[in-house]
Image (cartoon, grey):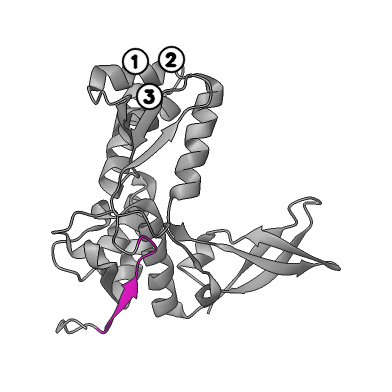
Amino acid sequence: MSENKFPSEVIDLPSEGKLYPKDSPLSSGKIEVKYMTAREEDILTSQNLIKKGVVIDKLINSLILTEGVSGDDLILGDKNAVMVAARILAYGPEYTCEVSHPVTGETTEQTFNLADCPFKKLSKDITENKFETVLPISKKKVTFKLLTGKEETQIAEELKSSQKIGTEVIPELTTRLRYTLISVDGDDSQKTISDFVNNLLARDSIHLRKEISSISPDIELQQEVLIGEETVKVNIPMTVNFFWPDS
């Protein structure tokens, strides 16, 4: 635990540190976060930060105590795990919110135990942030990575620029894939990757996105609940009460 004056906890990351450079503190698979204080509650209620869409990023950066690490360094699944851990440390594991039946749409209030959410981990043979797959239609072998918070921010800024210049179609999918791909058949030039992404066949695109989703480590925010007389698995929604529960 840090010698910082704030109480803190060292938490595990779903990636187990495998996707970070060896010289990064994150390669240990752990990160130290402090308990939330009134200062962090000020962050959460800042209308300016909420409007800018950066309130969660500011919160996470404020909570991380591991030296030399920020939320920008984390891949999305690890960032989600930090967010859930921060909420548990601040308000406890019980989280009450409304959920809907995935088929009937019937809504009901449920209380979830966030401490029961398991990690979806990487397979044991993965040792770096570099993955390969052969696309089913083009037969191209592509190498890709999982994005960090910094890259997600860069994507958001690029898309915002597209909106400002009045582009009719915002290229969210192709932009994301352009950042995700490392090489195509061994060619890692940006021109090759951009040309490939812009002409990627739909079935190959779906295959690639499924591969990325299946590989990505994360915290599984799903639990079984009773709605009516039926037990169903539902996603745990991140409502306003996630970080500001009624009390």
Disc 1 is placed on an element classified as helix
Position of residue 214 measured from the top left corner of the image (x, y, whole percent): 50, 47
Q: Is residue 10 magenta?
A: yes
Q: CA distance from mark 2 to mark 1?
A: 6 Å
Disc 3 is placed on an element classified as helix
Q: What residue is pinned by disc 1?
A: 195
> What amino acid type is highlighted by mark number 3?
Gln
Disc 2 is placed on an element classified as loop
Q: Is residue 81 visible?
A: yes
Q: What residue is pinned by disc 2?
A: 199
Neighbour class for label 3 at 10 Å: few (<14), some, many (≥20)?
Answer: some
Position of residue 59 measured from the top left corner of the image (x, y, whole percent): 31, 62
> What amino acid type is highlighted by mark number 1?
Asp
Position of residue 140 measured from the top left corner of the image (x, y, whole percent): 41, 23
Residue drawn at x 53%, y 70% as measured from the top left:
117
Q: CA distance from mark 3 to mark 2?
A: 22 Å
> What amino acid type is highlighted by mark number 2?
Asn
Mark in the foreground, 3 or 2: 2
Residue drawn at x 40%, y 78% as measured from the top left:
90
Neighbour class for label 2 at 10 Å: few (<14), some, many (≥20)?
Answer: few
Figure quadrant of the N terminus:
bottom left
Neighbour class for label 1 at 10 Å: few (<14), some, many (≥20)?
Answer: few
